[in-house]
Amino acid sequence: MTQSTTHQRGPRGVVPVLAFAGIVVAVMQTLLVPVIKDLPTLLSTSPSNATWVMTATLLAGAVSTPIMGRLGDLYGKRRMLLMSLAVMVVGSLICGFTDNLVVMIVGRALQGFAMGAIPLGIGLMRDMLPREKLGSAMALMSSSIGVGGGLALPLAALTAQHADWHALFFGAAGLGVISMLLTVAFVPESKVKAQGTFDVIGALGLSAGLVLFLLPITKGSDWGWTSGMTLGLFGAAAVVLVLWGVMELKLKAPLVDLRTTARPAVLFTNLASIMVGVAFYAISLVLPQLLQLPTATGYGLGQSMVVAGLCVAPLGLTMMFTAPVYARLSAKYGPKVTLILGMLIIGIGYGAGLGLMSAAWQTIVIAVVVGAGIGLAYSSLPALIIGAVPASETGAANGLNTLMRSIGTSVSSAVIGMVLANTANHVGGVAVPTMTGFRTSFLIATGAVALGLVFALFLPSARRSAKTQLRASSEEDANLRAATEALAGFHGRVLSPSGAPVARAKVTLIDRRGRQAGSALTDEVGRYTLSVPGDGSYVLAATASGHAPLASAAAHRGDHRAVEMDLLLPAGGSDVLA
């Protein structure tokens, strides 16, 4: 489950470089938002065909995120991060040189592969950074999606308004190349890797299931929600995903460890992530349209594309500024509390937004409040996931969590798009969104936040003994300690025969079937932390340079109490069974 891979000092430049990669991903996602309504004309196609330019990126990102995370765990997170960015650059260049719809869709699908950068970056941070820096670093990485989106929107609008729209893709390609160069220069490869092989069949099954599920969500409003195509795809998705889940449960090295995913700490975090994704995208859909509608409608604010982008930009900027605030709050109260607080703030923002839609400055207030809440919520999610899975599964687990957020944004886009379309006034063949549609959209977002709040309340609370608190270093990130010890497992120290701590020793947890159930590297004072998938007998195997290996029998009741077990490594000789 969790691993303590703490270093005394993380490589310099890792955090800003990885956060920049996250911002590049967000720029790619929001690239075409200012020109969405013009895409049919620009690509000489129908509006329904033009939507595939957005849908292709969503589908590719959803499919590639958990797969790239697992590949990163197995073969190197830095290597897969560079590959994700390289594919995005190729896709951007393809889009930059074409006006053909099919070629554009292919390029946009390749751009979607960049979504894997978020979980891979969080995994690299966990493997390299000391605990006291990890909380705020993960918060910054997680919120980089909002930061990049907020900054990209006005810049993309300015570019689209004063230059050829293809310049947007060349700009994205340039940012991708810069991110790759910075990653090569400042981010070393992680030494923490998972055991086993890549589950190709599982990857194909998950990809098919996700495409079958997300396709009718994104196209349902065009096809009709009760049409045979929409219902048939939903039914096929259910069958494929159930069969995929049955298969994954039988594999020794699955693409996604469903047993770990079913644990309350992981399950309810992922469910809450979907709701936060719904809330995040709702404001991005409503405010730009409200700001750009002409004042002749009686409620439109009559702003230009660029001004509308500037008014929404505080959404992302506020998310960035909440990262250090999150670190302090989480260190004191834990990531569960910060997630709940974030959702409450989002709810307040949307509630206030129901009455604050009559001036441009009011939309800025809404963006700031909602952005602060989303920043806290998004920052909490990777900490909760990392505290609930083994370090060797960090990439895959965070990839799945990122996928949950993407599903939330997809559902938000489909539902709110349907609401705005069904409540629009049709004037001269043009659909004009109404204030009723905007307010209904905000109510939907508020309902999603309320449901997410319920999921967050079901997250396990941290239970720490006084002895553990006294032994923990005051500089450790309380966020990770709380998340780690909220779940069942073993913890202790690896010591030499003289009683001195052994740093960088590897402790492997082996279950009763002889399979690896987790592993950890000790920190600078010899501490390790591991969790167990259930009650029963285990073996803790410890190895370190200059010492003989040790295999020690252990047992756990499967409750929330962490069993303390110090391991004394022999100076030399044969294996020892304690």
Image (cartoon, helix red, strand yellow):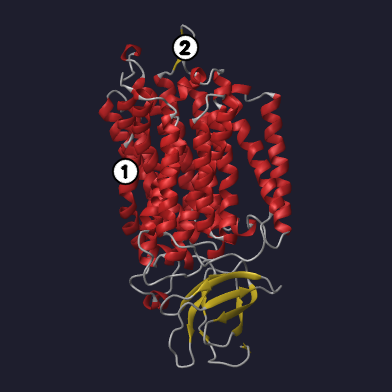
Pick out the residue farthest to the front.
97
For image coordinates 41% across by 30% down, the residue present is: 167
- Mark 2 nearby-residue class (10 Å; few <14, some 14–19, many ≥20): few
Disc sitting over residue 361 in the figure: none
Instruction: Look at the image and tell me in which quarter the C terminus lies.
Output: bottom right
For image coordinates 39% across by 20% down, the residue present is: 435
Q: Are marks 2 and 1 in contact (CB under 8 Å)?
A: no
- Number of residue marks: 2
For image coordinates 62% across by 25% down, the residue present is: 225
Horizontally, residue 425 falls left or right of residue 151, namely right
Mark 2 residue type = Val
Residue 110 placement (x, y as % from top left): 56, 39
Q: Decide: is 165 above or below 19.
A: above
- The answer to whether residue 530 of the structure is visible from this angle is yes
The residue at which mark 2 appears reads as 430
The residue at which mark 1 appears reads as 318
SS at badge 2: strand
| Label located before the other in sequence (2 or 1) | 1
Horizontally, residue 248 falls left or right of residue 348, namely right
Residue 165 placement (x, y as % from top left): 42, 26
- Mark 1 nearby-residue class (10 Å; few <14, some 14–19, many ≥20): many
Residue 343 placement (x, y as % from top left): 40, 45
Mark 1 residue type = Thr
Residue 34 placement (x, y as % from top left): 41, 27
SS at badge 1: helix
Horizontally, residue 286 falls left or right of residue 225, namely left
For image coordinates 50% across by 24% down, the residue present is: 419
Query: In the rendered image, which quarter is residue 148 located in?
Result: top left
Instruction: Look at the image and tell me in which quarter the N terminus lies.
Output: bottom right
